[in-house]
Image (cartoon, rainbow, N blue to C red):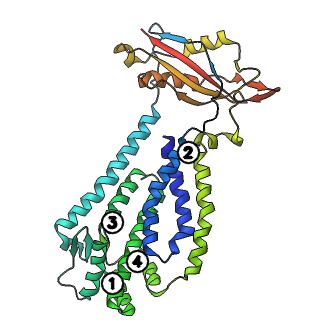
Amino acid sequence: MEWFIKTNLNLILLYIVFRFIMQHLTNRKMVRAILLAIPLLSFVIAIVGAIPSGEPPLLIVKLPQIVISNMQQIPNAKAVNWFTYILTIYLIGFVISIILPLINLIYYLRKPLRAGTAFSFNKVVYIPENTTLNKEMITLHEQAHVQQLHSLDVLYYHVIRAIFWINPIAYKLFEAIKQEHEFAADKYAIENIKDKLAYCELLVSETLQIKSISSLVHTFHSSNTLLNRLQMITQTQPQSVSGWKKIASIPLLALILILSTSSVQTFAQSGNEKVFKRAEIMPEYIGGQENMMKFLSTEIKYPVKCRDQKIEGSVVLKFVIDKNGRIKDIVNLKKDTDNLLVQEAMRVLKIMPNWEPGKNNGQPVNTEMVLPIQFQL
């Protein structure tokens, strides 16, 4: 989960770098390569940030094991598994994002006349027979998409957009790669025709009368990118400006790496507070250990489904007692335990009253704790 959050954050930061610096580069191949690299770089930086730093492990205080048996009362209400709900919603969105555009693509590839406009996908180039426009210009434009393998980029970004469908930047990047394809195809067509004015007139004429079709195909027209394409055709940015922008991107990329290598938990903690390796005075449950064990024994209920199916197991929870005595950053250390047992243990830990925090030099500090809970029938 943490790498997914980090990758989404990296996508946002790298897109900002692209918008601020790289989108105005005149080298079209370089811009295309940058756009294709952004999702992979976002993932790699997130993985690098997850690699342990090699620092000594934190002091972990292991609390006595508590045993939960079937003799306790059945809970009145079933705990809500929010993670499962969120994961289900995410997977539904992923499947829809993958399937719907593909269905739309097949729809137009099987009967291209429905599109009403010239388009290309992979090695398929369709030019309407009844068009009154300059077929040579349009054909050159669509052939450029085929020759430069733009459809592979689109399919690649189609998957990226589906994986990160909750992130609006994924859609922005998809639009950016499509626009870059149009820039490259326009450049190829103009180099062969050598008539910018006629090409621009054709582009405007086609765009004003044709509706949009599948996002996975390349059409000669594109109302979303018309002004940008006209500007790219008629203007050329000085190479000197591009040069300083390349240099300026270096510290921004370094900043992204620094931010990503900081854990998501650290951002969530107020004031970037550390979890100390040692505490001179260790945290203590208010009322002492006996009251803590009584609270856990009373509140933790044996899940009905696990009881009926005679499922047993142990849950080992790691958590932090912060300087205010609150429990936070709860993590399950035993991955092979039934999920319902883990959910119940975590549910009760989240409602546990505050502790007396650990102290160093008389000042409250964060301390990491481990609590083993055994479910047995």
> Which corner quadrant of the image does residue 278 belong to?
top right
The answer to whether the residue labelled 3 contacts the one labelled 4, judged by CB atoms less than 8 Å apart, is: no
Q: Nearer the viewer, mark 4 or mark 2?
A: 2
Residue that numbered label 1 is attached to: 189
The answer to whether the residue labelled 3 contacts the one labelled 2, judged by CB atoms less than 8 Å apart, is: no
Q: Nearer the viewer, mark 3 or mark 4?
A: 4
Q: Earlier in the sequence, mark 4 or mark 1?
A: 4
Q: Nearer the viewer, mark 1 or mark 2?
A: 2
Residue that numbered label 4 is attached to: 183
Whole-percent x, y for residue 43 in the image: 47, 50
Q: Nearer the viewer, mark 1 or mark 3?
A: 1
In front of the other: 6 or 207? 6
Whole-percent x, y for residue 304 in the image: 40, 17
Circle 1 Cα neighbour tier, 10 Å, few/some/many (<14 / 14–19 / ≥20): many
Residue that numbered label 2 is attached to: 49
Classify mark 4: helix, strand or loop: helix
Residue that numbered label 3 is attached to: 215
